[in-house]
Image (cartoon, rainbow, N blue to C red):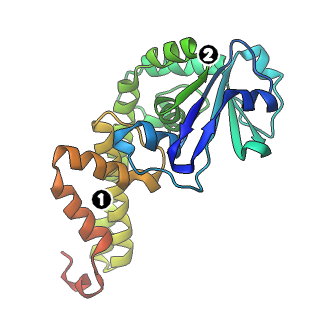
Amino acid sequence: MFFVKKIDKKIDIEKIKEKIELFETDIVYVGGSLIEGQINSNSLGMGNIYSDIDFFIIREHNKFINTDYIYNDKYKKTLFIKELKSDIEIFDNKFIKLLIKEINNINYNKNIRTENVIKLDISLLNVNEFLCRLYNSICLYNNKCYTELKKSINHRNFLELYKIDCLNSIDNEIEDVIGNIDEKQYDAALYCMRNIFINFSKYFIMKNNEYIDRDKWVFLKLFNIINKNYHYDIKEYYNKLFCSSLIDNKENII
């Protein structure tokens, strides 16, 4: 049983068993912003009273195939349990094992697009989401297999790849910033510059061996890390880009 302080609620595996059949080999864990904000000091403050609690199951392939679903994404099936007011995402263990193998054997080549490095039908965005939710989770059922699964993943390998993806996005948008400034399209230039800062923030977070899977939490996590490491200059750039009045400064942009 796990207690979520922010919403004053207990999470009990028995309640899940009442609503969905669980198998002995299932790995069941709970994650999402509320959980991450409670267990990860770099995510302090994450989640609110309206945030969902996300339940996840990793299930053997033959049992996964016969699992009912509302949505089906090949490697993942999604159910909604009304009584728990939560989605339950059920992953195919066969696919997850293949994914982990791909992650552990990442060998980046600059001639290959980052999106094509992992040779499975899943985007880097979705791989990042899966790993972030697993990394920042609490096991509810089958803790031994859950622990072994987490230990089997070379997280640094994936974070290195995703950092490169962020840097590529930054490089692409820098040209847009310069081009829009030349054309005096300052609103477009500002929009691109803010995107660059968001991608830089993601890069900085991953540089500190952390996942981030939702843009809305980027700055919260960034500032939590900054406050530990004293990189206050980054906060100053954030204030200029996102919090200062720029209306009277457009003509001063160089």
How far apart in space, not on screen, are marks 2 and 1 (Cα)? 47 Å
Disc 1 packing (10 Å; few <14; some 14–19; many ≥20): some
* Image location of residue 140, percent across then percent down: 60, 25
Left or right of 230? Residue 70 is: right
Residue beneath disc 2: 142
In the depicted view, which residue is nearer to us: 247 or 132? 132
Image quadrant in which you'd find residue 246: bottom left
Q: Amino acid at mark 1?
A: Ile
Left or right of 101? Residue 209 is: left
Residue beneath disc 1: 174
Q: Amino acid at mark 2?
A: Asn
* Image location of residue 190, percent across then percent down: 33, 71
Q: Nearer the viewer, mark 2 or mark 1?
A: 2
Residue 49 shows up from this direction? yes
* Image location of residue 31, percent across then percent down: 55, 37
Indicate the quadrant containing the N terminus: top left, top right, bottom left or bottom right: top right
Q: Residue at x 64, y 35 (%)?
A: 55
